[in-house]
């Protein structure tokens, strides 16, 4: 069987649209992961836990004992940056060059080793956690992790360097205000957002000419058998919390039970829980309505499918973030934080956003894309630069308190898709 | 190709009648106008070198090939175009073609089962035939667990158990070593007498054919060149090919003039019961064992004799083989029983003579078919 | 040491490979399944045999249903590969001239040169609601406006059949190719019709090829998550997907290992019974 890593990106591009979002790719890789399986099995045989035995096991303030001021003072710039990211997640020209990174090198003299090695959160976590547990280097100075259980684990285990915000004034000045203290990382002490996305609904207006406005619309019997959901229980679980009127961040187990009930009502109408390929299915009319990521919808629309519409449901919309972190064992943390600061400029964020087309963490990049890069399609898209009113409806994923909490969520929500 | 010969109706008392059958493969002619009748219960051998058409003839009788022209009758019934499974004919294949996935018993009962004979009865009858071929107690074995000779017996039992009107045997001894072959020849002859089934036996081994067959036909290049009882065909072969194929033969040129036939040295040639030929190109054949050698120191004169010089003597145990040079530059071969009082040595002058009944004339070009009747006439 | 000759070395190497590639993973899987713990605090071997009852009796996820589904899909797909693959192999083995055999076999193999996932995705496109096949069927009124193939068990089984067809064709072809064709004449000579030639001679003699094919295809399709993920829908969730989910998403290594072990045992029992019934008896007695 072919593992995802072996698929030629050119082939993927030819098969889908002009651009492939890293999220679509990630799930494809996960669905057929075979290569990663062996290493994880071996890891499972050795099986040390991911909570470092010496570290504070209660989590939350695992790094509390470190004097970060003197920690940063002891580090110096080395002129090298090892950067691990997801595929198709940075500006890339036809020669495979990244203009944003080259400009950074030119300005700072820091050479960047950019590697697209992260296929999905669980398997990347499984790969790095044994090394981080032992306090060994993972060979990376920046890694990009989605908010959720694994990000929480990394922060709680004290595996992420606490950022020295005095070294990243651009972040403080230019980041979207909501990113200065996300629910999963209060005060943005360990993370800086790389890209944001929305998980809302999309529909094919050829099949649903009347349009939809809410999660409640999904229960309309005329859509039965034509609805797609994500197979990730965080996605459909969070959706159900919104649909039943709960706040994700403060939701209780009672709220979760209600959400499961709502999902079980919806389930007979669901055609498929998608790991990947929901964009094709929407375009081809195999499904009419689906949970969707904003970036995918933007790219479908740009790729000749204006009939695909994105909806911010009246009940609310989920927002998620992929975050840059500096691993505690990073060899070049100063170079890393230098890049983080550099990224939070309208120019750099704009160049990258013009390629990525998710949601830009730097609102001022809009003007740069519009006036300097002359790409109004991106700049004016409410999917890339959503209005403040839209963002006000957005809620982040529920943040798991601990493993038991995470297991309880899985135990409740897994049987919905696994049936 | 000449016009096809008219096909005469089958002799109704014949087990098989092959009437004017030819077989072409593209431009190549494998079998030309073969006419053959096998009497019931007869052991008939079809003899010839490889590629002579004997196997093709057999396969046409078996139904594995369709004749290009002509017809084949089985006990008077036209079977020319019938598929193999509709003919009361069975074959012992050269490779035996035993079913490797079936036991000896299942192999033997195979034909009966296909004909709808019940399982128990088929097994009983198959058992009888396995006993007949000396394989009682081998029922449960697989072919791969048997020796070559045993496999051949199974193939025989498998065919005979069906009581075919004719049993076709395609070089059945080909894969056996010489010693087993000898035993199997006797065995086969015994079985054939016991079951009384007509055998059509294809072989390239003339000794095998002569020792077993009631009658035989010698084929060459798709034609039957001679057909008859083994002794007649051996003693009075119709063509030089037949003469030389059936053992060794001295072939001498002859001179034809008004007075009759002469040997190259001028001595007259007399053959019992045969008029001297009138056209040139004829030859005379004499088997080596029919030559008599007597020491001589002068040129021989008289009918059926000549003088020769011994060039080589090979002691063969029961006999001695001598090679002789004739005055006209030819070579003769002679076998002598080692009972003669005189001993010959290379360099000796000998007088070579033979009985007028023991030489035979060979026509200039091979023409098809001289039957016993024609020879006798 | 003259006794330590080549045959001994070969035997030793063979045994070493067997242990390395078959025995160790088997035992490793079993051991992991008997561990307990979680990804955060680590997994320790606690001889937790109760996991096997937990996943079937106490689980909130219906693994027994998924196992049943997987076995059903796999068995159906295997049967279909025989029905389609046997005539195909027969055609190449007996009905074409020798110089065409290699190109035709290559044709069978050529699909392997394309990534398995891409191949399957092509079917997602072809069988889509607006894809060429359904559009055509609808245009000639053979299919209603709501007719769908994707998302049905049929689509999953079809995908498995398509993707594994060559695994059935090749061993059958090899078995057929080895048959001495003179046996066909022998069968006809012994009053066997063309039908008997097939059922009494060709079929029993190609049984080993069918058996190999079944072994490969059944094992592969029963454990396969990809066809179900790509071509299936809400009601086609199978055991392979469940194993993958437990392993990759939940990182419950012990559950994933236990599920794999159950699958392996189920396959083992089925194939053992199959081998006992069909492997040692003669098909002649069964037909």
Image (cartoon, rainbow, N blue to C red):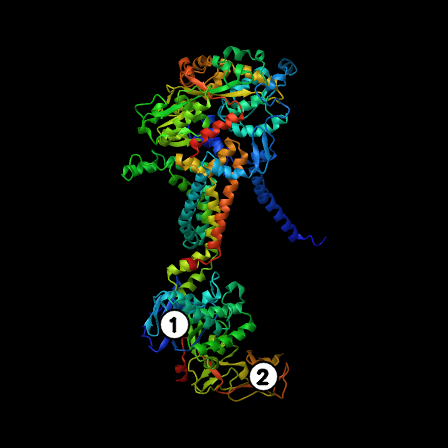
Q: Position of residue B252 (x, y in %)?
A: 51, 79
Q: Which residue is mark 2?
A: B336
**Dot 1, how many residues are within 10 Å of its Cα: few (below 14), some (14-19), or many (20+)?**
many
Instruction: Give the numbered dot on residue A355.
Output: none
Residue B59 in view here: no
- For discs 1 and 2, the disc positioned in front in the rendered view: 1
Please give the chain letter of the residue carrying mark 2: B
Q: Nearer the viewer, residue A229 or B112?
A: A229
Q: Quadrant of residue A379?
A: top left
Residue A247 in view here: yes
Q: Quadrant of the C terminus of chain C?
A: bottom left
Q: Position of residue C47 (x, y in %)?
A: 58, 38
Q: Position of residue A42 (x, y in %)?
A: 59, 35
**Dot 2, how many residues are within 10 Å of its Cα: few (below 14), some (14-19), or many (20+)?**
many
Q: Secondary structure at mark 1?
A: strand
As drawn, C157 above or below B371: above
Label 1 and label 2: CA atoms lie apart by 39 Å
Please give the chain letter of the residue carrying mark 1: B
Q: Secondary structure at mark 2?
A: strand
Residue A80 falls left or right of residue B286: right
Q: Nearer the viewer, residue A272 or C96?
A: A272
Q: Quadrant of residue C139?
A: top left
Q: Which residue is mark 1?
A: B34
């Amino acid at each position: 069987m072919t593992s995802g890593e072996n698929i030629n990106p050119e082939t993927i591009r030819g098969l889908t649209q002009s651009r492939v979002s890293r999220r679509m790719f990630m799930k494809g890789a996960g669905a057929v992961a075979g290569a990663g399986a062996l290493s994880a099995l071996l890891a499972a045989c050795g099986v040390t836990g991911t909570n470092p035995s010496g570290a504070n096991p209660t989590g939350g303030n695992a790094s509390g004992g470190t004097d970060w001021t003197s920690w940063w003072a002891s580090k110096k710039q080395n002129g090298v940056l090892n950067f691990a990211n997801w595929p198709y997640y940075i500006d890339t020209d036809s020669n495979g060059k990244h203009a944003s990174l080259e400009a950074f090198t030119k300005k700072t003299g820091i050479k960047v080793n950019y590697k697209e090695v992260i296929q999905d959160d669980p398997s990347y976590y499984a790969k790095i956690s044994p090394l981080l547990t032992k306090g060994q280097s993972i060979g990376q100075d920046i890694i990009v992790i989605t908010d959720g259980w694994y990000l929480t684990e990394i922060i709680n285990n004290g595996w992420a360097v606490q950022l020295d915000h005095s070294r990243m004034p651009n972040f403080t000045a230019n980041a979207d205000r909501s990113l200065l203290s996300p629910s999963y990382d209060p005060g943005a002490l360990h993370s800086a957002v790389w890209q944001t996305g929305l998980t809302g609904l999309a529909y094919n207006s050829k099949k649903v000419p009347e349009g939809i406005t809410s999660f409640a619309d999904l229960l309309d019997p005329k859509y039965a058998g034509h609805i797609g959901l994500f197979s990730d229980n965080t996605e459909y679980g969070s959706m159900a919390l919104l649909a039943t009127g709960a706040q994700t961040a403060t939701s209780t187990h009672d709220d979760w039970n209600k959400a499961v009930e709502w999902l079980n009502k919806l389930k007979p109408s669901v055609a498929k829980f998608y790991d990947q390929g929901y964009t094709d299915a929407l375009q081809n009319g195999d499904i009419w309505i689906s949970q969707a990521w904003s970036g995918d919808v933007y790219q479908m629309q740009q790729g000749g499918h204006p009939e695909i519409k994105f909806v911010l449901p009246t009940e609310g919309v989920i927002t998620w973030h992929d975050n840059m972190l500096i691993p505690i064992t990073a060899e070049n943390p100063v170079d890393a934080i230098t890049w983080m600061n550099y990224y939070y400029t309208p120019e750099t964020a704009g160049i990258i956003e013009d390629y990525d087309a998710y949601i830009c963490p730097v609102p001022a990049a809009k003007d740069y894309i519009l006036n300097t890069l002359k790409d109004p399609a991106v700049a004016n898209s409410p999917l890339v630069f959503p209005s403040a009113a839209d963002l006000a409806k957005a809620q982040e994923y529920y943040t798991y308190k601990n493993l038991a909490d995470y297991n309880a969520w899985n135990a409740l929500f897994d049987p919905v898709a696994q049936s | 190709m000449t016009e096809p010969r008219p096909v005469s109706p089958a002799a109704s008392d014949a087990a098989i009648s092959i009437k004017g059958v030819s077989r072409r493969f593209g431009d190549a002619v494998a079998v030309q106008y073969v006419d053959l009748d096998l009497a019931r219960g007869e052991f008939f051998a079809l003899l010839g070198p490889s590629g002579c058409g004997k196997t093709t003839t057999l396969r046409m009788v078996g139904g594995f090939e369709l004749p290009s022209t002509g017809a084949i009758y089985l006990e008077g019934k036209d079977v020319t175009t019938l598929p193999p499974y509709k003919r009361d004919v069975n074959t012992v294949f050269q490779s035996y073609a035993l079913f490797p996935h079936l036991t000896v018993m299942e192999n033997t009962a195979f034909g009966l089962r296909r004909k709808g004979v019940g399982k128990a009865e088929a097994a009983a009858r198959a058992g009888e035939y396995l006993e007949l071929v000396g394989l009682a107690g081998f029922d449960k074995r697989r072919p791969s667990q048997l020796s070559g000779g045993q496999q051949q017996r199974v193939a025989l039992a498998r065919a005979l158990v069906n009581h075919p009107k004719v049993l076709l045997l395609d070089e059945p001894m080909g894969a056996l070593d010489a010693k087993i072959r000898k035993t199997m020849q006797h065995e086969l002859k015994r079985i054939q007498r016991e079951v009384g089934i007509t055998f059509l036996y294809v072989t390239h081994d003339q000794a095998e054919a002569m020792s077993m067959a009631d009658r035989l036909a010698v084929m060459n290049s798709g034609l039957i060149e001679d057909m008859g009882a083994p002794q007649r065909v051996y003693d009075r072969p119709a063509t030089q090919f037949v003469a030389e194929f059936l053992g060794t033969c001295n072939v001498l040129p002859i001179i034809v003039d008004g007075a009759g036939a002469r040997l190259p040295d001028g001595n007259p040639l007399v053959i019992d019961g045969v008029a001297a030929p009138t056209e040139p190109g004829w030859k005379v054949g004499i088997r080596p064992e029919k030559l008599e050698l007597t020491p001589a120191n002068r040129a021989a004169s008289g009918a059926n004799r000549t003088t020769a010089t011994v060039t080589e003597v090979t002691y063969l145990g029961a006999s001695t083989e001598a090679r002789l040079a004739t005055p006209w530059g030819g070579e003769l071969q002679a076998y002598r029983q080692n009972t003669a009082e005189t001993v010959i040595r290379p360099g000796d002058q000998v007088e070579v003579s033979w009985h007028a009944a023991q030489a035979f004339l060979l026509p200039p070009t091979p023409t098809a078919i001289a039957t016993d009747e024609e020879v006798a006439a | 040491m003259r006794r330590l000759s080549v045959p001994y070395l070969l035997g030793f190497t063979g045994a070493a490979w067997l242990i390395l590639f078959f025995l160790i993973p088997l035992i490793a899987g079993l051991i992991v399944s008997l561990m307990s713990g979680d990804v955060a605090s680590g997994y320790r071997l606690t001889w937790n045999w109760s996991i096997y009852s937990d996943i079937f009796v106490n689980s909130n996820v219906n693994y027994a249903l998924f196992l049943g589904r997987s076995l059903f899909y796999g068995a159906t797909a295997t049967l279909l590969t025989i029905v389609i693959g046997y005539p195909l192999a027969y055609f190449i083995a007996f009905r074409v001239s020798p110089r065409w055999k290699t190109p035709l076999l290559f044709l069978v193999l050529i699909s392997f040169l394309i990534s398995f996932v891409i191949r399957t995705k092509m079917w997602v496109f072809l069988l889509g609601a607006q894809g060429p096949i359904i559009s055509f069927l609808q245009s000639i009124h053979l299919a209603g406006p709501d007719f769908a193939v994707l998302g049905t068990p049929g689509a999953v089984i079809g995908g498995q059949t398509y993707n594994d067809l060559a695994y059935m064709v090749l061993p059958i072809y090899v078995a057929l190719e080895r048959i001495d064709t003179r046996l066909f004449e022998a069968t006809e000579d012994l009053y066997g019709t063309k039908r008997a030639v097939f059922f009494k001679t060709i079929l029993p003699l190609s049984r080993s090829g069918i058996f190999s094919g079944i072994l490969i295809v059944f094992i592969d399709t029963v454990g396969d998550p990809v066809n179900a993920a790509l071509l299936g829908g809400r009601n086609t969730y199978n055991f392979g997907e469940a194993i993958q989910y437990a392993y990759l998403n939940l990182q419950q290594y012990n559950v994933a290992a236990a599920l794999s072990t159950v699958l392996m045992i189920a396959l083992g029992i089925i194939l053992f019974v199959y081998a006992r019934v069909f492997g040692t008896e003669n098909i002649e007695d069964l037909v």
